[in-house]
Image: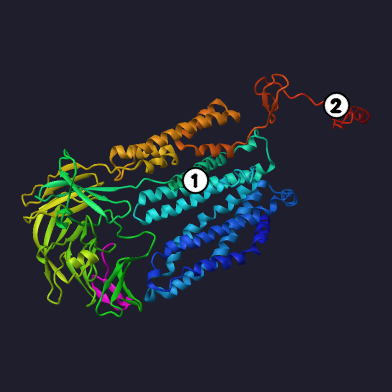
Amino acid sequence: MNALIKKEFGDVLRWTPLGMIGAFVAAWLIWPTQNSHSYAMEESLISQLGLAAGVIAVALGLLQSLFDTRNDSRGYLLHRPWRHSQIFWAKVIAGFMAYVLTLTPAVIATAMYLGWKGIDWLPVGAGQVIPFCCYAPFVFVLHPMVIWIANRNASWTGTRLLPAVGVVGAVLLVWAGIESLDAGQMLVGTGVLVVAIGLAVPLTLWASRHAFTSESYLPPASSAQNFCRSNVVLLAISGVVLYTTVAAFVIESLPKEARVYNQYMVALGEQDEWVQVRTTHAASNWNSMTTATRPIDGKAEFESTKQLPLSKSGTYLGTALGQDRGQWLNRFSNLGSFESDSTAGGTLTLTRDGDRILAYNYNGLQGVITPDGFSPIASKSTGGFSGKVTVLTLSRTARKNFSPNDNPVLMDDAGLYQWDASGKSVKRLLAGDFQAAGLSLGATSDASFFWTISGTTLTRYDLELRPSSEETLPFVSEIVEMTYSYQLPLISLHAAETFEVAPVRQNETVRIVRADDGRYGLVRSDNGRDSQYRMLSGDGSQSLASVDLPIPAVPISEARLGGAIPPILGFIAGVATLLGSVQVPASHWLWILALIQGLVAAVAVWWITGTRGFSQRSRIAWVVTSTMLGIGTLIGIVAIYPKLICEACPRCDQQRRVDREACEHCSQAWDAPTDDGIEIREQEPNLAPAMAEIS
């Protein structure tokens, strides 16, 4: 076995320098040279260098399979004292060794470059190559996929390349799973990774092994060597993926009716009464919108009205729950750029690195920010934020997102801080574990307040300028409306009023509205439809009224995807809509078209399985499968089971399969061929006379 591995490795070793050059060029193209190109290096390595790794895996698979498909090469290879399965595994092991050898120089060079730049010049580090090193071994699954394709008993113009659809789809699915982990959806991302890797790798290896050891000998359709469960599962999935992709592309290419986007919310009306608000955005211009309101009970129709003041539509509080306060994949995260009078260029870009913040400009690292203060030298910084720190989202309203362009407020698990961009210092504003916080801008500076939620306490704070500040308190002005930004001075917070509220739930939105008489209201929502609301008072009451907002309408033209997606997904979308667990529900036409697709697929599968000699039990199983997975199942069946070759039976005159000894209708065996008198048949030797002489 070792000698066979050495032989296979030696055959591909001479080609590895070409792969090394290609991998190095792909890595070199993504090496960052400035701040803006440095973030998400892990993602860039996985996507771009991962693409090069896929090309290398495919190339190695071609080198180890296509040359051996020639009759002379294959005959020489198989007439050796090794089993066919041993030859296959030797190819895979040798291919993996060459794959690792080809990528290693590019990975080492990238790690050295990132380590050399370090954090002194750019927010990068040598350890950023680790996610790619974890992802690259899975990409090698494309190598056995090529061996599978090369040895399949199928036409190149037919379904020969179908396995590539499923396996490449699995590689992309793993990348999507990594992205889900990065977005904080640990459960979803982990599930995707387990399913994709746990199924794709073993199924591809076993299907490839079967094709190499059995299918390449062109066994008859009735032979047991023609069947492999891994082959069945992967080709069926590949057929579904292919149909869904092509059908969705065609459907999306068709003309669509212009969609009008409606958004619904609870707000205060002109008379400070609770109302339902519908904001309609034109399909051609998102900024062109109209506003309509109706009583909160929803018994009347919406009537057009002028746009509500920002105070009555409310300000969202930035929540620590349900938002990304730390990434699993990327070490460094861009927190934004802020003005600084004491910095060359006038701005500093803040970058999160674990429990600290790095401040950069075009000259490189300017210092490290921690709760202990600002350190110009990274190695001399002390302390660290509690958990992952983030720049708090301030003043996000239902219509706009007003952002401070200097002196941002920072939030971690231990409290709130303000970064003095010009003085390069940090001040703790509040201590505590806050689940939500935000700044509500009023029409005047004395109507702007800060809000926090900690546990069951909602607190309103008055803003006060710090003595060193020369600015004024922020408020909504014409300039703020136009630029979506405001100057946030150095402030201090003083608790003015507290209210008892329920704790903030995961992914819940919290909004503060203000009436003309100075009272405040609270609006909370989990999924955008079920909204709870009440006016705030200091009597300790926590009870909120509740209302179900209308479901946004989905045009029929967008529901045509029901004819492309697997029917089981249409069913799941329908159930999620009925349960109200999705913010933008699916149209009922989506379910209907998905159901029609499932029924059409079931009828077609029942017919095609009959033409391929399936048993009654197998036909029923495939019909059930096609009802759930759709028309793509037909492609899988055509790829898995070849078309039967039949001839008329001389006894019953019905079409019978030529690959079976007996007729499936009358059990008649094939007639022996007639002799022409020139046949030479091998016969058993008559050894009786010789044995008699010996005895």
Could you tell me the amino acid type at mark 1? Val
Asked whether the beta carbons under mark 2 and mark 1 sit within 8 Å of each other, the answer is no
Image location of residue 68, percent across then percent down: 69, 52
Q: Secondary structure at mark 2?
A: loop
Q: Tag on residue 675? A: 2
Evaluate whether residue 434 shows in this view.
Answer: no
- Going by the numbered disc 2, the residue's amino acid type is Asp
Percent x, y for residue 554?
Answer: 32, 43
Residue 144 picture location, percent across and down? 58, 51
Which of 235/472 is in front?
Answer: 472
The reply, left or right, for residue 156 in relation to residue 386 is: right
- Residue 62: x and y in percent read 63, 55
Say whether residue 256 is left or right of residue 374: right
As drawn, the label of residue 246 is: 1
Please give the range of residues in magenta.
367-387
Tell which tag, 2 or 1, sits nearer the viewer: 1
Other residues around mark 2 within 10 Å, as few (<14) / some (14–19) / many (≥20): few
Q: With 18 as the anchor, is 34 left or right in this view?
A: left
Q: Is residue 40 above or below residue 139?
A: below
